[in-house]
Amino acid sequence: MKKQDRLMNLKNQIVIDKVCPELASSANNLVFGEGDPNSSIVLIGEAPGKKEDESGKPFVGASGRLLNELLSKINLERDMVYITNIVKYRPPENRDPSKEEKQSFLPYLIKQLDIISPKLIITLGRHSMDCFLPKRKISQVHGMPEKVDGRLYLPLYHPAVALYNGSMKQKLIDDFLKIPMILNEI
C-alpha cells in the first residue's frame, strides 16, 4: 500500500476512533497534514487555527505564509515537505491545545511519522517540542538537533512568534538555514 493511502486510512481512523469529540464538534475540518509523504522532512505545529480549520490544510494563515518564506530561503517549497500538527482539530478561540488533547492525538502523529519515515522532524513551537523533547526550554534548544529513539528532531520557534515579535524573525531564519547542513550530515 502506498504511503498516501496509508495516511488516508490513518486520517479516517481518527474519525472512526472519535478522537477528542468535543474539539471535533466545534471544528469545521479535521486538519490531518499535507505535502510529500516521501519527504525527508516533516514539520509539526501545535494545532490548526481559524484559516486552517476553514481550509482543512495546515499552516495556511499568516504563520503559513511566513513558513513558506522560510522554506524558500533553503530552496524548498511546501509541497516538497510534509506539514502537520499534533492536534488535528482547531481548539475553540485558538486556545493552546491541552495536555490531554495532545496526548489523545500523539499515537496518531507517531503513526504518521512511522508511515512517512522522515530523516528530520522539525517541531515548530514549544507544544510540539514538548511531545518529543520534554523538559526542555525552546529558548535554550532551538536550532539544536537531538536524536531520540532513533529519530532526529530539530526544535524551532513557531513562525507565529515572529509575527508577534519582529526581532525573532532573524532567529527563525538562522535556524532554518541550518536545515540543509543537518540533512547533509545525516
Image (cartoon, rainbow, N blue to C red):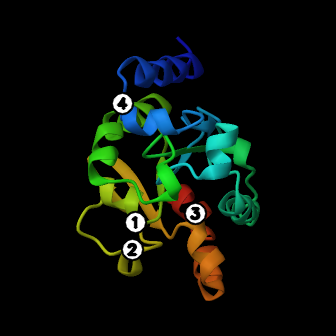
Q: Gap in Å between the C-alphas at discs 1 and 3?
A: 18 Å
First-in-chain label (2 vs 1): 1
Q: Tell me, yes or no, whether the two marked residues, 2 and 1, touch with CB atoms within 8 Å.
A: yes
Report which residue position mark 2 lands on: 138
Q: Residue at x 43, y 46 (%)?
A: 86
Report which residue position mark 4 lands on: 19
Q: Dot 2: within a 10 Å radius of its alpha carbon, few (fewer than 14), some, or many (20 or more) residues?
A: many
Of the two numbered discs 3 and 4 in the rendering, the one whose residue sits closer to the viewer: 4
Q: In the rendering, at what x and y percent does residue 157 appear?
A: 50, 70
Q: Which element is circle 2 on?
A: helix
151 or 89, nearer to the observer? 89
Res. 150 in view: no
Q: In the rendering, at what x and y percent does residue 20 appear?
A: 36, 35
First-in-chain label (4 vs 2): 4
Q: Tell me, yes or no, whether the two marked residues, 1 and 3, touch with CB atoms within 8 Å.
A: no
The amino acid sitting under disc 4 is Val
Report which residue position mark 3 lands on: 179
Of the two numbered discs 1 and 4 in the rendering, the one whose residue sits closer to the viewer: 4
28 or 119, nearer to the observer? 28
